[in-house]
Amino acid sequence: PTILSFFFSFTDWNVNRSVVSFIGLDNFKELFADAKLRATISNTLIYSFSVTFLRNLMGLLLALMLNLSLRGKNLLRTLFFLPYVIAPIVIGYLFKAVYQSQHGLLNTLLRSMGLAFIAKDWLNDPNIALFSTIMVDVWRTTGFTMVIYLAGLQLIPKELYKSAQIDGANGVWRFLHVTFPLLAASVTVNVVLSLIGTMKVFVMIMVLTNGGPGFATEVLNTYINNYAFAFGLYGYGTAANMILSVLILILGVPVLVL
């Protein structure tokens, strides 16, 4: 499939043609001349980096907290992980109702607290729509990130902490010089999985905003879907998909190597 995708990205394959012809770099020239694609790539990168940073930060903090001897920590681990088990399409429809401007749970709660000035049309305001979708994905995936960090924390020998404590190291020093370096493998796994997953985001955006308003939340996979399947421009859509594949390689490989 990868080799065929590479081939078809250089063709004029579309729903109206019975014969596929080689057209060289024409699809790519048209793609890079499209202002919408440039905005789409920007949205995709903002979405990917934002979700990756926030879910790793929050996942690590939750893992550190739930690695302590807390009462009910197993229940809390389950509750934080639960959103990841639910299908993304279900979460998308759930938050579409939560974000609803007039009777949605979020705005209703804000108004009841006397914070009506904060209430927004979360999914239809082009200035905040992308942020709204980002926060949904962070909420959905942080629990998965937390579990991987918990696994890494439980592999760190307790003797190292005792030795550092005897040497007079405080909590911050122990985290920076013992915990974090020994979590390097967990960090790599979480960052790579998050970057790849968020670069390929589709369902969440499609359900919440369908790329709108305008193309404020359009990402590469919704762009590809529109041109390849809605308009039937398979060659053009495949060329856009090759750009997505290259971006994933550019972002993912250095993280794995470093």
Image (cartoon, rainbow, N blue to C red):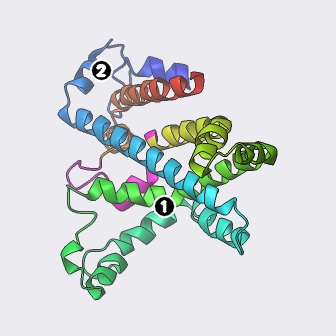
Using the image as rendered, state which of residue 93 and residue 156 is in the foreground.
156
Q: Which residue is mark 2?
A: 28
Kind of residue indicated by mark 2 = Phe
Helix or strand or loop: what does disc 2 sit on?
Answer: helix
Q: Is residue 39 visible?
A: yes
Within-10-Å neighbours for mark 2: few <14, some 14–19, many 20+: some
Residue 132 located within the stretch drawn in magenta: no
Q: Give the Cα separation between the discs numbered 2 and 1.
A: 36 Å
What label does residue 139 carry, if any? 1
Against 187, residue 215 (above or below) is below
Quarter of the picture containing the C terminus is top right
Q: Quadrant of residue 75?
A: bottom right
Kind of residue indicated by mark 1 = Trp
Mark 2 vs mark 1: in front: 1
Within-10-Å neighbours for mark 1: few <14, some 14–19, many 20+: some
Q: Is residue 206 visible?
A: no
Kindly identify the residue that appears in the image at 23 percent across and 63 percent down. 124
What label does residue 193 carry, if any? none
Magenta-highlighted stretch: main secondary structure? loop
- Residue that extends furthest to the bottom in the rendered view of this protein: 112
Q: What range of the chain is rendered magenta?
A: 199-217
